[in-house]
Every structure is written in C-alpha cells, then in structure tokens.
C-alpha cells in the first residue's frame, strides 16, 4: 500500500503539546518505503515519539510518523546478545523487555521518552551511559539513494547528543531498525552519584533490575512526566568549553559544576547556569523552566511554538550575560 499523506493535527504527537497541523502519514510497514523514495515531493520530517521537537503551527514538511514494531534476538555471540528493535518501538518498553528477557545493559537509559528509532539520532544518554556504548548497528533507508544500508557505529558520527542523523543526514536517513550489543557478563554502571548512592542499591549483590528501579525512581523525582506537564526533556545541551575557559569561569564562580571530558575539554551543567541566571521555576507567558530541573522547559498549558522560542531566547540571553556561555538548544524545530 502506498503511503497517503493527509492533513492532521500533531498536537498529540509532540510531548511539549504544541498545536500543529501538517500533511502526515503513518509508516507501519517497511514495504512502503521504496514507494516513498520514488514519490518524494515536499521534504520529509521523520517523527518518532515527538519528545525532542518544537513544532511550528503549520510546518511545511510532510511528517512521517514511524510506527514499525518488533523486537527479536537477532544474533548471539560468545560475549554478547545482539538484540534488534524496530524504530517505532517505545524506548522504555524496549529497555524493560530486554531486562525481562535476561538481556540487561540498557537499564541506565530507562524511562527516557521517545522511540527506539529516535534514540541514535541524538545519541541518548543518562546516568553514566550513552547509547553509542551499546550500539551494534543502525539499519536505515537512504531516502536520497533509495536503498537500505546497515551502518556500524563508526559511520554514525556519534558525539554528545549528536550524530550524523541529526546533522548532514537530517531528512536523508530513515532509521528502520536498531541493533544493540548487550554484554553477557553484566557489570553495573554506577558512575553517576545519585545512582550509586540510591537506597535500592545499598545491600548485597546488585541486579540489573535494581539499577533499573533506581534510575526510574531518580527520573520520576527530578523530571516532569510529559503526560502530566508538557516538556521535551533537557531543552539545552550541557555546554562543553576548553579547559582554560572553564578554569577562568570556575575562579569567578566557585560553585560552577564542571565535568572534565576524555578529550581534555570540560562540560558544564546547563541546569546550574540557568538556575544561577534566575530562571529556575520562572515563567514567561504559558511556558517556564521547571522548578526541580531548570534545564527542562515546560508548557503550563496553551503554549505555541512562538512562546517556546521566546523563553529559549530569554534564557540563552540571561546565561550569556551572566557567564558569557552560549547555550545550544537540543530539540529540533519542525518547520
Ligand atoms: N543543577 C542545578 N540546578 C538545576 C538542575 C541541575 O544546579 O536546576 C545541577 C545539579 O545539582 C547537578 C548538575 O546540575 O550538580 C547536573 O544536573 P543533573 O544531574 O540533573 O543532569 P543534567 O546535566 O542537568 C543530563 C542530561 C539528562 C540526563 C541527566 C542524567 C543533558 C542535556 N541532559 O542532565 O538528560 O537525564 O544528565 O544523566 O545532557 C534529557 O536529555 O532530556 C535528559 C533529561
């Protein structure tokens, strides 16, 4: 069946809950993709769970809502379970399913909103683990060339909250399946202090389920549930500075949260910068920065894209004025 794009409301398809209407179609069968490559007219925006997007009211893009489903053990090697999930699977559902099947290794990434297919795009990461550390390969259609390819991690250009799919490849690659290499010998990832110190993990032998419970609990306490209060998670990336610049700032602001990176640069906590700049829990019109985590922009009800842009600019300006640091927006804009 060829895909049919029709005018639709996308307000339920973005976790910020912004009103938007566009030509949209649901992709639930890979067999429809070759036809899509042949018929391409208006540029296509590939939408997963809508948890990392700011939607304009009337985007010019045609929106492809990826709803491909399926999870299987694709291969077993001496050391790894290689598990494959279709792009439209819920990320958290997939993490939970893997645990229940006895394939742990993704539990630090529990409860991240969105879909499996979107996870490599921004190289999701939390609580001491980034997706690229577990990725085996990405199966994607190159919409320009009209063929399917399997990309190893080295072809994905992964960096902190970044990949080739977000930059040069935006609109080119349609991710259909993602494979993960999960080590058969499980070792807990406890680099993040809140996880390491969580009460659930304090006695006896640790299990993957305990780490999962701890991560879910920390997230529920800190981060607003998009089903209750519209948001797109962290709205800015944590800025990465060179060491000299970070040292200078640390001298002026001793409370500055700094995280030295393997490449010698230094990551700063954007939430701390925003809080110090006076924006934690503060509103501008119908939107605001969250009261428990200043890095999360929330929709208190009735917001439009313009409200989000206005607040984002105000916060960026305040942090620039106070610290001389530029904050880069993380969610992409659908226009
Ligand atoms: N902080 C403040 N005030 C705030 C928020 C944070 O002072 O309002 C301080 C905290 O006290 C802490 C530091 O900033 O010392 C870092 O905060 P946190 O541990 O909450 O993590 P983050 O750097 O703000 C990043 C990710 C999150 C991820 C957490 C945990 C980015 C952009 N965000 O947040 O990802 O869950 O680490 O690993 O890297 C997301 O992308 O949507 C997301 C939630």
Image (cartoon, rainbow, N blue to C red):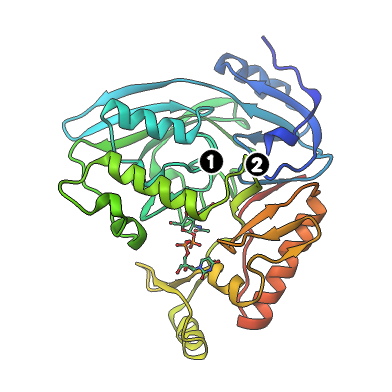
Residue 38 image point, x, y percent:
69, 21
- Quadrant hosting residue 260: bottom left
Residue 136 image point, x, y percent:
35, 37
Residue 283 image point, x, y percent:
74, 63
Using the image as rendered, state which of residue 293 and residue 79 is in the foreground. 293
Q: Are marks 1 and 2 in contact (CB under 8 Å)?
A: yes
Identity of the residue drawn at 68% across and 81% down: 321
- Quadrant hosting residue 23: top right
In this figure, which residue is indicated by the disc labeled 1? 113
In this figure, which residue is indicated by the disc labeled 2? 15
Against 82, residue 162 (above or below) is: below
- Disc 2 C-beta below 8 A from ligand 1: no
Q: What element carries label 1?
A: loop
Q: Can residue 104 be seen in this view?
A: yes
Residue 316 image point, x, y percent:
68, 70
N-terminal-most mark, 1 or 2: 2
Identity of the residue drawn at 60% across and 48% down: 168
């Amino acid at each position: 069946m060829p895909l049919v794009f029709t005018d639709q409301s996308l307000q339920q398809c973005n976790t910020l809950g912004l009103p938007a209407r566009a030509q949209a179609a649901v992709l639930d069968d890979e067999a429809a993709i070759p036809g899509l490559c042949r018929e391409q007219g208006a540029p296509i925006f590939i939408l997963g769970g809508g948890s990392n997007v700011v939607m304009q009211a009337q985007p010019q893009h045609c929106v492809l809502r990826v709803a491909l489903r399926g999870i299987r053990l694709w291969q077993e090697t001496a050391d790894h379970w290689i598990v494959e999930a279709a792009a439209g699977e819920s990320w958290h559902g997939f993490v939970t399913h893997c645990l229940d099947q006895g394939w742990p290794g993704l539990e630090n990434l529990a409860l991240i909103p969105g879909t499996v297919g979107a996870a490599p795009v921004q190289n999701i990461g939390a609580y001491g683990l980034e997706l690229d550390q577990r990725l085996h390969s990405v199966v994607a259609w190159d919409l320009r060339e009209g063929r399917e390819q399997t990309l190893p991690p080295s072809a994905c250009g992964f960096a902190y909250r970044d990949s080739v799919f977000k930059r040069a490849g935006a609109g080119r690659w349609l991710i259909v399946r993602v494979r993960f290499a999960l080590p058969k010998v499980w070792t807990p990832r406890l680099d993040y202090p809140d996880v390491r110190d969580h009460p659930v993990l304090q006695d006896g032998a640790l299990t993957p389920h305990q780490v999962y419970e701890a991560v879910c609990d920390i997230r529920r306490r800190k981060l607003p549930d998009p089903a209750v209060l519209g948001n797109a998670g962290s709205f800015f990336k944590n800025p990465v500075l060179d060491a000299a610049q970070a040292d200078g700032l640390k001298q002026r602001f001793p409370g500055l949260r700094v995280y030295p990176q393997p490449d010698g640069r230094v990551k700063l906590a954007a939430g701390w910068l925003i809080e110090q700049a006076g924006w934690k829990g503060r509103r501008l019109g119908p939107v605001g920065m969250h009261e428990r985590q200043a890095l999360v922009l929330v929709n208190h009800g009735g917001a439009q894209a313009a409200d989000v842009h206005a607040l984002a600019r105000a916060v960026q300006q305040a942090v620039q004025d106070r610290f001389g640091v530029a904050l880069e927006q993380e969610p992409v804009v659908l226009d």
